[in-house]
Amino acid sequence: MPVLQIQGDDFILDGEPFRIISGGLHYFRIHPDHWADRLRKARLMGLNTVETYVPWNLHQPRPDTFRLDAELDLPAFLDLAAAEGLHVLLRPGPYICAEWEGGGLPSWLLTDPDIRLRSQDPKYLTAVDSYFGRLLPPLLDRLATRGGPVLAVQVENEYGAYDGDAAHLAHLAALLRRLGVDVPLFTCDQPADLDRGALPGTLATANFGSQSARGLAALRAHQPTGPLMCSEFWNGWFDRWGSRHVVRDPAEAAQELDDLLSTGASVNLYMFHGGTSFGFTNGANDKHTYRPTVSSYDYDAPLDESGDPTEKYRAFREVIAKYAPVPPQPTPGCGTKLAVPGIALTESAPLFDNLPLPDAPVSSEQPLTMEELGQDFGFVLYETVLPTAGPALLEVEEVRDRAQVFIDGQPVGVLERENHEHAIALTVPRPGSVLRLLVENQGRVNYGPGIHDRKGLLGKVHLNGSELTGWTNQSLPLTSLSGLAFTGGAEPVVGPAFHRGTFVVDAPADTFVHLPGWTKGNVWVNGFHLGRFWSRGPQRSLYLPGPVLRPGSNEITVLELHAARLTRTVDLRATSDLGPVED
């Protein structure tokens, strides 16, 4: 692979002026069996480059554990990009935003109550240095200077929207260089944040989704010389629970892209293919009100969540063809989809009857946070004995993020961070009744100062003004469901429960799980965690990648946090439902 250089106002590649026409796709949001397909479709749309973030929290889930295998085999992804003839823009963070849990920062950082993330705090820098020291050496052979596809590497991510500490950016840039990264470095910021987020001597780029002339003018005013580039051209957007599905008119987005490319600037589409925040990995925003993001990261991108080209794909391809060579092959068709209606979930395993799952509970005087329990994702079940009977007011200092409240196993209400709720009135049947609070981490905040987002019950819990002490804290990461004891029957189940069924397919293919009549919870197929569902919407289906399925019998498990119908069924359908769109 040729090496990217910066000369004057141009990128130079192999001795010739070069325009980067890139698109974002995150390997960690795509089933690895689909990586090659998505990369091929990127090239066929006319892209010469792809961009990906790198999620620290998945690659280093614990300080002493590092992964670069299976679905996290970044070197293999980069090799596939090179085989497709694509260059790569690598964005390793350490902070990535990406509407990803905690912006990619691992939750174990938050076990230190005083840590200052994204700063020169020595505790944070020690963790970053250790992470990059593990991540980067296996990637060096994939740099363009060594014949690989990686043209350039980003320093941090939109730092100007968070802070303006140039020393921190300089530390990260020096760390990249010290570890052997010798391709060009760049920063990216929204136009208003360029002065705070740029690093002298490093190429600055801008992020915007419209009014390209204004955005590029701000970039040129900040940086008088150097290639102009929009590192995130927002051609769509993400969805949050309780809103509507966000879409952007393909013709309008294509015209904005045309306006951008007509200036001669380089571009990275955000996103070319969004994919899915499988499992518990979605992020959240908190601008005075907490708003968790849905599992789908379809993003109304040119390639939809299941990898099918959209009208936006075709419109963008036509625009790109005006400015760069586009492969002569026709637009790819849509993939085969599977439909299996009416799958009966005939077995159930009540959550409270299956504890501990998997680890023994931890005792404490006050509730422990998820981070103090060494847990990243999922739920924590808090339990204590109530000293008195009668009408009572339960007050919780801070719920992160949603607490279902039970007295002697019976549900009595919900406290939601999103609604700024801290108290619930209830009746205690007898002295010695057991109080349980099942608290869900709905996604750590991924943007702004709220990234210091510890989960579980924070602070003290009071009943009628008196502090409740003597808690057991049960971690429920739900990384495996192997310990569940299922029984048959269609009896009503009180409280959260897992429901399981089987279905048969002849030939595996992509499909979408629809859960009409269900309320809130999670879905696993053959042990693969698809993500969250919630009747609140807008998302009404979960993408199921074909490689998760196998010929013959397959197993589906649904965790319903509230109440399931007596006749418990789910559908596999050939089409998704991401909800009603914005007006």
Image (cartoon, rainbow, N blue to C red):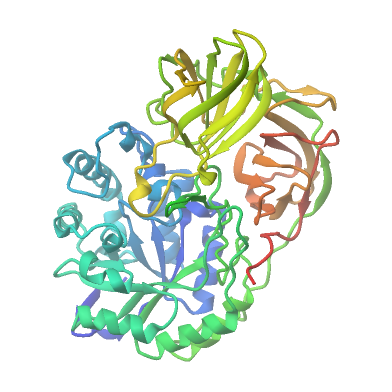
Q: Quadrant of the N terminus?
A: bottom left
Query: Residue at the spot x=32%, y=82% of the render?
Result: 216
Image coords of residue 309 (percent x, y): 62, 72
Query: Residue at the spot x=58%, y=18% of the render?
Result: 435
Query: Residue at the spot x=19%, y=69% of the render?
Result: 202
Please say if 235 is above or below 274.
Answer: below
Q: Find residue 57 and report its image quarter.
A: top left
- Observer-nearest of 563 and 177: 563
Query: Residue at the spot x=57%, y=62% of the render?
Result: 298
Image coords of residue 24 (percent x, y): 45, 66
- Observer-nearest of 410 and 146: 410
Q: Is residue 515 left or right of residue 56?
A: right
Q: How many marks?
A: 0
**Does residue 582 show up?**
yes
Please say if 207 is above or below 262.
Answer: above
Q: Is residue 304 left or right of residue 373?
A: right
Q: Find residue 287 and report its image quarter.
A: bottom left
Image coords of residue 104 (percent x, y): 38, 48
- Observer-nearest of 131 and 183: 131
Q: Quadrant of the C terminus?
A: bottom right
Image coords of residue 223 (percent x, y): 20, 79
**Does residue 3 show up?**
no
